[in-house]
Amino acid sequence: MDFKNRFNEKYKTTPKLFGKEPTPILKKALTYIDKGKALELGVGNGKNTLYLSANSFKVTGVDISKEGIKILKERSAGNPNLNLVVSNVLEFKTAEKFNLVLTIGLLYFSEKNKINSLIRKMKKWTAPGV
């Protein structure tokens, strides 16, 4: 089973796959950056995205799993501060700049040669001076 289908199946059977609490490192990051636009790559079911949105961020969330995005849309109830995109993060494109760009856990699932490309993109998407 390929990566996308594997996670679609996991979210169908376990909607709270990664829990509901945000990652502790994200809470710490918000002591340095407390508002603005955020980009989360590999949002999954949205625990970090929802936390960012609840803390004054306008968030773009990207994930290859349509099931993960579906769960997040249900949990966010049409939150206007969320832009949710079903896409392979390696193929995602945007001209926007963000105050915070994060990926939690996604790099563990990525091939080594693709990680450097993704990090370069993340740097490009980060607003100057951040």
Image: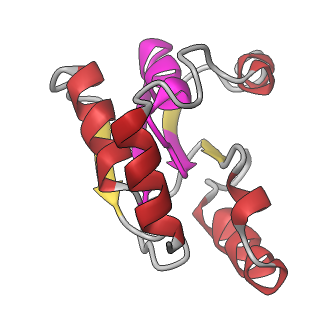
Residue at image location 44% in from the left, 22% down from the top:
50
Residue in front for this viewpoint, 17 or 84: 17
20 relative position to 119: left or right: left
Residue 63 covered by magenta stretch? yes
| Residue 124 in which image quadrant | bottom right
Where residue 15 appears, x then y in whole percent? 40, 29
Residue at image location 45% in from the left, 32% down from the top:
46
Here the colouring is secondary structure
**Which segment is the magenta one?**
38-64
Where residue 77 appears, x then y in whole percent? 18, 20
Residue at image location 20% in from the left, 29% down from the top:
80
Q: Quadrant of the C terminus?
A: top right
Residue in front for this viewpoint, 104 or 52: 104
Residue 77 covered by magenta stretch? no
39 relative position to 29: left or right: left
Residue at image location 44% in from the left, 72% down from the top:
92
Residue in front for this viewpoint, 29 or 47: 47
Determine the residue located farthest toward the left in the rendered image: 78
Does residue 103 lie above or below 71 as drawn?
A: below
Please say whether residue 62 is visible from this viewpoint: no
Please say whether residue 94 is visible from this viewpoint: yes
Determine the residue located farthest toward the bottom in the rendered image: 113
| Residue 23 in which image quadrant | top right
Where residue 88 appears, x then y in whole percent? 46, 71
Does residue 121 lie above or below 66 as drawn?
A: below
Where residue 72 appears, x then y in whole percent? 33, 32
Residue in front for this viewpoint, 106 or 18: 18
